[in-house]
Image: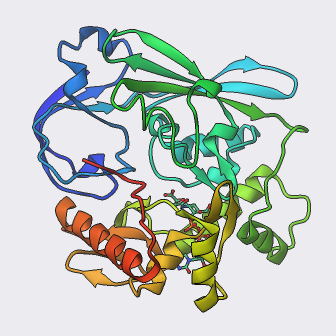
Amino acid sequence: MQISNKVSSKPYNTFNIDLDIDQLITIDDVSDFEYLDIDLTKILVLGGGSNILLTDKLTKPVLHINTKGVKVVNDQESYVLVEACAGEEWHDFVLWAISNNFGGLENMSLIPGKCGAAPMQNIGAYGVEIKDVLHAVKAFDKTSKKMLTFHNSECDFGYRSSNFKTIWKDKFIITSIVLKLTKEGYHVLNTSYGAISKTLEEKQIINSTIKDVSDVVIAIRQSKLPDPKVIGNSGSFFKNPVVEQSLFDAILKDNPNMPNYLAENGVKIPAGWLIDQCGWKGKVVGQTGTYKNQALVIVNHGEATGEEIFNLSKDIQRSVKDKFNIELEAEVNIW
Ligand code: EPU
């Protein structure tokens, strides 16, 4: 465990927001929790800070989870159970799985953030979500100070949501994730997402491997999403809204080419498209703005404050509401 005072928040959030952290506690091993003598219910936990917008002072202690390690904990004929510590970089973990020929994570290549944050909002991309491969989540209970294990069915995973983000918010610190990954001969490739099948076809790859799918996903993401190491961002800022059929029909009348997907209780419309239609794509507002290739991604062009980014997100919400009568909900957590 390391404790430092007055450090910059910049390396601890992918928006690159620069605020003073009064006290930063870095946890390198789960056994560190035994020696932590602070009220854990009053702290901010940061993994890679890939899904948070820091807008307020960081006067409470900040806990940075930096535990490392990936291991196979159960090896069967068709699958393995792999445990990854919360502080492992998600994409490094995906690459580790692919190099070991363990399948299931390839569509989620290059998602920024750490393994510990992945189940919080049920990360997903190109037709696969972590819930599809997640076996269990291990977490430290801030109140009872005990380690607990939650199985997949207990977490109530939904679209960019889980109990960790809703009813259990701030109750637990995720320490590791256990995933069920397929072995050679048992892989189930998911190439149904248009952009993946199109790119595989263009490259004339017929019997694609998990590595091929990962490479294609990396190429697609690099072509339309900014690298947080270069331009601060938090991926999609808003969720894709699901609207009632009647509202959808009304919007479709004026916009016959509007992309859409059938959802359980209505029609899902890409938030990026709605924001784009309101003229926000690539717009620069002071030090912030939206990304030139994907309007759903709000970026920090350098020295933006959290407040500036938050204000832009509110302006975007207002224009989408005015033009389409749709309320966009932030996907990113606001601190
Ligand atoms: N679109 C536009 N203009 C834009 C952006 C998008 O017209 O500026 C249109 C696209 O042409 C496409 C549609 O909107 O027809 C959907 O766009 P895209 O395929 O890029 O996907 P998305 O719905 O914007 C979602 C996830 C991403 C994930 C991709 C791929 C959400 C909120 N976002 O984006 O997740 O990578 O699908 O699966 O569900 C994230 O959560 O941080 C994230 C990046």
> Quadrant location of residue 255?
bottom right
Q: x, y (%) of residue 49?
A: 34, 46
Whether 190 is drawn above or below 133: the answer is below
Q: Is residue 268 left or right of residue 166?
A: right
Residue at figure coordinates x 49%, y 43% from the top left: 121
Report how many numbered discs are placed on residues in the image. Answer: 0
Q: How is the image coloured?
A: rainbow
As drawn, 192 above or below 20: below
Point out the residue furthest to the bottom here.
254
Residue 277's place in the image compared with 7, above or below, is below
- The image shows residue 146 at horizontal and vertical percentages of 39, 9
Check the image and name the residue furthest to the front: 246
Q: Depth check: 191 or 231 in front?
A: 191
Q: Is residue 299 left or right of residue 265?
A: left
Q: Quadrant of residue 25?
A: top left
Residue 112 x/y as whole percent: 47, 52
Q: Residue at x 36, y 66 (%)?
A: 230
Left or right? Give the position of 151 relative to 236. Answer: right
Q: In percent of the image, x 75 and y 26: which residue is there?
A: 80
Q: Quadrant of the image for the N terminus?
A: top left
Ligand 1 is in which quadrant of the figure? bottom right
Residue 176 drawn at (x, y percent): 50, 25
The residue that appears at 18% across and 12% down in the rendered structure is 37
Residue closer to the observer: 133 or 80? 133
Would residue 187 be found to the left or right of residue 98 on screen? right
